[in-house]
Amino acid sequence: MSSHIPSTHRFPPAMGEALQECRGAAPLPRSCCSHQGIASSHAELGRCKMALTTTPAASITQAFFCLLLCIPWGSSCPPSCQCTERAGAKAVLCSSRHLVEIPKDIPKDAVFLKLDANSITRIPSKAFRHLSHLEELDLSRNAIEKIDRAAFKVVAAGLRTLDLSSNRIRNIPKKALLTLNAKLRLANNPWHCECALQAVLWEARLDPDSVQDITCHTAPREEYVGKPLLQVLDAGVNFCSVRQRTTDVAMFITMFGWFTMVIVYVICYVRHNQEDTCKHVEYLKSPSSTQGHAETTSTAL
């Protein structure tokens, strides 16, 4: 059994003494105590169990206790992923595993996370809230359509690279990306060219090698469709000002409608009062003429 104990696993003195005894207690395979994450432990678990069954009966309990000590329980790996080390940092590889959502049991000390080539459709709020050490995140070649505003909130400060290329993203909340310090890859998505996307292009740290592949799949005007967004903006188009003009026109139309309704109401009110006044005058005239006719008749008699 390997005598190397990962620095991330600290045991009480009693367990430490027991572990020292484990070195010569049972002939377990070296991989039983290797620090390769739970995925590697699963791969070797059957071999370790066979080693336990071949040890003397008096040593089985001690050997099994050694096995429990050596398995890195605090740094488990999702069953559908592979956990390894890259340049001394934890890397979690979940590429092409037919995932439909982000695994919830990703190790907290993960620095590199690859979730590319899966079927993930949405990045919910705080999806990576427990991954405070994350620096590189690859979500390319998925089916992502929606990204919540707080999707990358917790990892925003430490993330250095975020790959969202080759998905189904049409639009994205401005706050979801502008809080990031990471270099972004947004190419090969069916983007709807609008003010929010323009703001991302102007203010976010985009990967210069992929900027030309951010193409307008739909746009307010047909002439922009199929063109790189950067090319459209270089031509002097400002989607934010277009939206502002559209808003101003809508407000003008609304105000004009209200003004027209007020004028119509006033006209109707004046006409209604005129009609009431005419009827009242006629009503007042009618008794007077009747009284005058009666007096004339009385005088004649």
Image (cartoon, grey):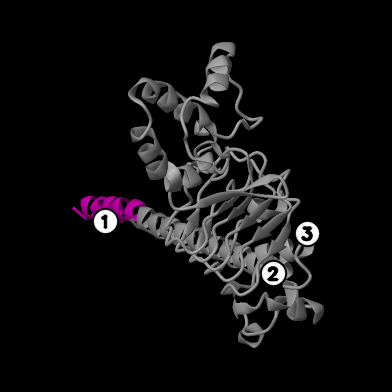
- Image spot of residue 217 (x, y percent): 58, 79
- Image spot of residue 81 (x, y percent): 49, 52
Mark 1 falls on what kind of element? Answer: helix
Specify few, some or many for label 3: CA neighbours under 10 Å numbering under 14, 14-19, or 20 or more: few
Mark 2 falls on what kind of element? Answer: helix
Specify few, some or many for label 1: CA neighbours under 10 Å numbering under 14, 14-19, or 20 or more: few
Determine which residue is flagged by label 2: 245
Give me the residue at 40% from left, 37% from top. 51
Give me the residue at 43% from left, 26% from top. 63
Q: Does the magenta stretch include residue 286?
A: yes
Q: Main secondary structure of the magenta part?
A: helix
Q: Residue furthest bottom?
A: 223
- Image spot of residue 52 (x, y percent): 38, 33
Q: Distance between the residues labelled 1 and 2?
A: 72 Å
| Res 293 label | 1
Left-right relation of 199 to 39: right
Determine which residue is flagged by label 3: 203
Specify few, some or many for label 2: CA neighbours under 10 Å numbering under 14, 14-19, or 20 or more: few
Q: Which amino acid does label 2 sit on?
A: Arg
Left-right relation of 118 to 195: left
Q: How far apart are marks 3 and 1 (CA)?
A: 92 Å
Left-right relation of 224 to 49: right
Give the mark nearest the N terminus, 3 or 2. Answer: 3
Give me the residue at 53% from left, 31% from top. 74
Please report the bounds of the magenta region as a residue range: 283-301
Q: What residue type is labelled 3?
A: Glu
Between tags 3 and 1, which lies in front? 3
